[in-house]
Image (cartoon, grey):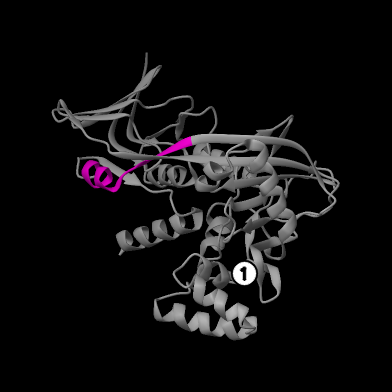
Amino acid sequence: MAVHTCDDLVLGSSPVSVLEAVALARRGRRVVVAEAEPTIGGVWRPVTVGDQVYADQAPHLIDARPGIYEFLEDELGVELVDVSRDAYVAFAKPIFGRRLFPYSEYWLHKMYNGNDREIFRALSDAGHEAETVSSRVYGMLAERGDPENRQSTIKYFKGGTQALVRRLNELLRSHGVDVLTNHRVSALVYDSASEQWTSETESASVVSRSVVMNTHAFPEAVTFDGETVSLERTERPAHSLFLTIENTPDYFFYAVFPESPLVYLAADVGYSSSGQSETTRVVSVTLNNMGVVKFGRPDAICRAVVEDLRGSGLISRSSNVASVDLLSLRRGSLAEPAISHVTQLPGLRCVSSGGGLDVTLMEMQARDAKLAA
């Protein structure tokens, strides 16, 4: 069995984990990244649908929070393109006489995800203009500390998530970070005498002074001086539906469905793919778990999803579905008590990749600014 020695071991290779690894390497530390899959990227790695590789594994949106686009362009060196005109909020029922709104009017989405849903619907049904309701909504949200200071422009990676993953690989190589793919860490063992952690995989072990876990990438067990540390976790099913849609020239970048009983998010995963036909699109849909249980059979799920997409105006009524791929898996996350527990152990800390890349990057920047001060 191969043995690797380093200062820091980083578990998982989602963008936030990779950025942590690069930040450590920039301080002159020897860093190893252990990734369970054959390639890096986490949920940002490309997915294969049918015989073709498309840019996105699932719908992604990077909200225009302060400094995020600048960080991605200037610090990471990725090229972004403006996708504002093709990102939407799609309602099942008409709001102010329409069902499709620009996502830049994110206050609509905010209202439908909050406790003010019925108030908002009542204002719409009463015939109020969108601008009037918008003004009232902003006032209500401002009293609660919202809305966040976002820009109206929405940008995304030119070339899709393939471009992001490629750039992350370049960063790891240029900073001398060793990446062990196909290495699922089953256990972490700490020895007080040497003040070191030893990780165990099927084909290698890594001895390090510190370990950076991820709330979605963590070992099965942690042992501290011979005692097993409880790692309470939660698991939830995640369902994605990939639809190859023919006879439609329509395309969109991203849409959120606040009212749908089945569709949560939808995206044209071939949006940035130059090889895709003008009349054939591949749409990735993140499903609501309760909706999957309700609709049951895959054919019923597919019909309901297509109806939602057609009803909102995102794809043509004349289009037809050529192929369907349903991807279901279980995603595990460390529970908060476990995070608090393990981070009290010497040389062990945890980063979060929840809440979206934009939220995570803001949290990282705030933390680094605090440390620098």
Image point 18% across, 32% down: which residue? 195
Judged left or right of residue 44, residue 354 is left
Q: Is residue 326 visible?
A: yes
Task: Judge left or right: residue 187 versus residue 62.
Answer: left
How far across and how far down the image is residue 310, in percent?
75, 55
Query: Residue 98, how many percent across, how many down?
Result: 70, 71
Looking at the rendered image, the quarter that the C terminus falls into is bottom left
Depicted 96 relative to depicted 215: above or below = below
Is 251 situated above or below 58? Answer: below
Q: Is residue 183 left or right of residue 169?
A: left
Q: Give the class, few, some or many, for how many residues have Cα within 10 Å of label 1's Cα (few <14, many ≥20).
A: many
Residue 55 can be seen in this image = no
Q: Residue at x 70, y 36 (%)?
A: 324
Q: Amino acid at mark 1?
A: Ser
Front residue of this view, candidates 271 and 237: 237
In the image, residue 338 lies in the stretch drawn in magenta? yes
Query: Disc 1 marks which residue?
Result: 104
Query: What x and y, as percent, mark residue 239?
Result: 55, 40
Q: Secondary structure at mark 1?
A: loop
- Residue 143 percent location from the top left of the image: 40, 81
- Which residues, given as a range, are shown in magenta? 330-342
